[in-house]
Amino acid sequence: MTEAPNVLILGIGNLLWADEGFGVRALEVLQRNYQFPDHVRLLDGGTQGIYLVQHIREAQILVVFDAVDYGLPGGTLKQVEGEEVPKFMGAKKVSLHQTGFQEVLAMSEMLGNYPQHLLLVGVQPVELEDYGGSLREPVRAQIEPAIQIALAYLQDFGIQAKRREIPLRPDTGLLGSISDIQRYEAERPSEQHACRVGDARVLESDRFDLAYRPIQIEEDAIHVDVDAHLDKYRGI
């Protein structure tokens, strides 16, 4: 009897930066609505980067949901397989986690364990520069199509997901309101109360004073001029 392959379905991204959260949101919807065999794991990879290496090394089949800059119109869904995946993960840096994940794949290969089959289901983001923002509608609309692509891919390997009769509810008690996209959007403060790109009330406040303040060094301390070239910026 053939042993079932280890399968990892991974959602990566940052929920706090609008469309950057697509991968995690897609994974949430998948997990709440479908059940999988024991050899299939679903993992919220967030922005963990190299901390995902061991998980990747253990997977024979890897499916990744993410926001990726394909250079296409916002909201465009695109799937990439096999050796092409790392090229798109690092083709254009949408966020810090992508460079990290590209390194994860490289490290996994270097350590001798790399998924035999790899699928990236990515969406072109519409908006990233919105701290605390949620998915834009064109991106959010691609969650279900992305899930169907992943399910069809897994079916080719004989892996069948079973739809739950009653979807799981978000665990807001453990994870907070951010785990429930509807509640998260409803409870988000207005832009007037929570600036999206840097709060001028803080930056212009007398209490927020940026200045270079040299540290007093004790007479018997060892002094090394490792950054003397910066003196011109300090008014020394």
Image: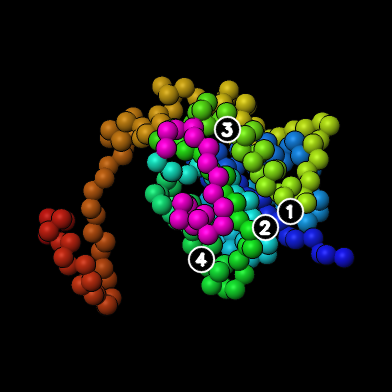
Q: Residue at x 73, y 37 (%)?
A: 32
Residue in front for this viewpoint, 5 or 23: 5
Contact check, label 1 and label 2, Cβ < 8 Å = yes
Residue in front for this viewpoint, 232 or 160: 160
Question: What is the C-alpha distance between the residues marked 2 and 4?
Answer: 16 Å
Residue 45 within the magenta-colored segment of the rendering: no
Q: What residue is pinned by disc 2?
A: 61
Residue in front for this viewpoint, 66 or 96: 66
Q: What residue is pinned by disc 4?
A: 106
Earlier-in-chain disc, 3 versus 2: 2
Question: What is the C-alpha distance between the residues marked 3 and 1?
Answer: 24 Å
Q: What residue is pinned by disc 1?
A: 157
On screen, residue 131 versus residue 34, left or right, reads left
Question: What is the C-alpha distance between the residues marked 1 and 2?
Answer: 9 Å
Asked which secondary structure carries label 2, the reply is strand
Whether residue 118 is visible to the viewer of this picture, yes or no, is yes
Q: Is residue 145 above or below residue 187?
A: below
Earlier-in-chain disc, 1 versus 2: 2
Q: Which mark is residue 142?
A: 3
Whether residue 177 is visible to the viewer of this picture, yes or no, is no
Q: In the rendered structure, which segment of residues is drawn in magenta?
A: 72-89
The amino acid pointed to by label 2 is Ile
Question: What is the C-alpha distance between the residues marked 3 and 2?
Answer: 23 Å
- Select label 1 or label 4 by which is in front: 1
Residue 73 horizontal/vertical position (percent):
42, 33
Of all residues, the one furthest to the right in this rendering is 1
- Select label 3 or label 1 by which is in front: 1
Residue 202 horizontal/vertical position (percent):
34, 34
Earlier-in-chain disc, 1 versus 4: 4
